[in-house]
Image (cartoon, grey):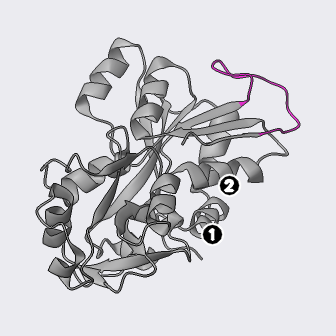
Amino acid sequence: MLATLIVLGSLSASCAVSGADVKMTGSTTVLPIAQAAAEELADKYEIEVSGGGSSVGIAALLDGTTDIGDHSRPIKGSEYKRAVKNGVYPFTFHIANDAVAVVVNLSNPITNLTLEQLKDIYTGKITNWKEVGGKDLPITMVSRDSSSGTFETWEKLVMEKAPVASSSIFTSSNADVAYAVSSNPNAIGYVGLAYVTPQLKALDVNGKKATLEAAINYTYPIARPLFMSTNGFPSPGPVLDVILFILSDTGQRLVQEVGYAPIRQLP
C-alpha cells in the first residue's frame, strides 16, 4: 500500500524534485514520523510524504526524485556506489529507534516465542501453532516484501539469511501486515512499533517485550535505528529545517507520540 500525504503550507517556493517545498519518500516504518512532522510544519512548508519501502526511498534519493529518503535499514555499499556514480552523496541522520514487534491475532493464546522458533516458523519448519504451545491450527505467515527495510532487519536478526518460505503472504507496508494479522486468527506477522494497535497482540521475543525502553537500550532482540538521508548535508532552507525539527526535543517528543523511541533521553 503506497501511503501519500501532501500538507499545504503558506510558502510557495518549489524544490528541485517536486512542486512541494520538501519531498520525503520511503520506509513505511518511518512514514508516521514523516507525516507527523509534515503536519506540524504545515504552516511553513508544503511537504509531500510517500511510503513504498526503504529501498524505494533510497532509490528515489539516488535518482534525485526526493529530497529526503526515509529508511529503516542502513544504505548498502552497492547503493553508495550507485549514488556516487549519480553525483549524489548521501548524508544519513539517525532520527528514531524501533523494536520490530512480532504480532498475532487477539484470539491467539501464545505470549512468547524465541528467535529460533520464529526462524523455524518463517522457514516453514514449524507449520502448526500446537508445535509452539498453541492451538491445533495451521500458521499463516505474513511478511514484508524484499523492498522493505523491515524485511531486511527480519532477514538479518531472525532468519540469519535463511529464506522466508514462499508460502508466506508478502505485503508492501506495515499497515498491510497489521490488517492481515488482525483479520486472521491463524496469522503471525512483524511490524514497526508504531503499528502495534489494540487490534493486535504483540508477543514477547526471548522473554523480552517490544517497548520504547527496550528500543532505546537495545535489550529487545529485534531493535533497530531508523534513518532519514539527504544528498549531502542540507543547505539552509526547508529540507534542513525539517531535519532539524525532527532531531529537536519537540520533534523527538513527536517521534515518541507516534510510537517510536527517541534517539536520546528527553528533558
Q: Is residue 208 left or right of residue 101?
A: left
Q: Quadrant of the N terminus?
A: top right
Above-or-below relation of 48 to 103: above
**Element under disc 2:** helix
**19 falls in the magenta region:** yes
Question: Where in the figure is residue 194, as x and y percent of width and height?
Answer: 52, 65
Above-or-below relation of 130 to 30: below
Give amino acid for label 2.
Answer: Ala
Give the magenta range.
Answer: 7-21
Q: At 37% across and 62% down in the image, what residue appears?
A: 190
| Residue 178 appears in view | yes
Q: Is residue 161 left or right of residue 72?
A: left
Question: Where in the figure is residue 123, as x and y percent of width and height?
Answer: 15, 56
Tell me whether the residue at label 1 lies in contact with that at label 2, contact meaning CB atoms closer than 8 angstroms.
yes
Q: How many marks?
A: 2
Q: At 43% across and 74% down in the image, what residue appears?
A: 105
| Residue 261 appears in view | no
Q: Quadrant of the C terminus?
A: bottom right
Q: Is residue 145 left or right of residue 234?
A: left
**267 falls in the magenta region:** no
Give amino acid for label 1.
Answer: Glu
Q: Give the residue at mark 1.
A: 257
Q: CA distance from mark 1 to mark 2?
A: 9 Å
Question: Where in the figure is residue 59, as x and y percent of width and height?
Answer: 42, 26
Q: Give the residue at mark 2.
A: 36
Foreground residue among 259 and 228: 259
- Considering the whole magenta stretch, tell me its main secondary structure: loop
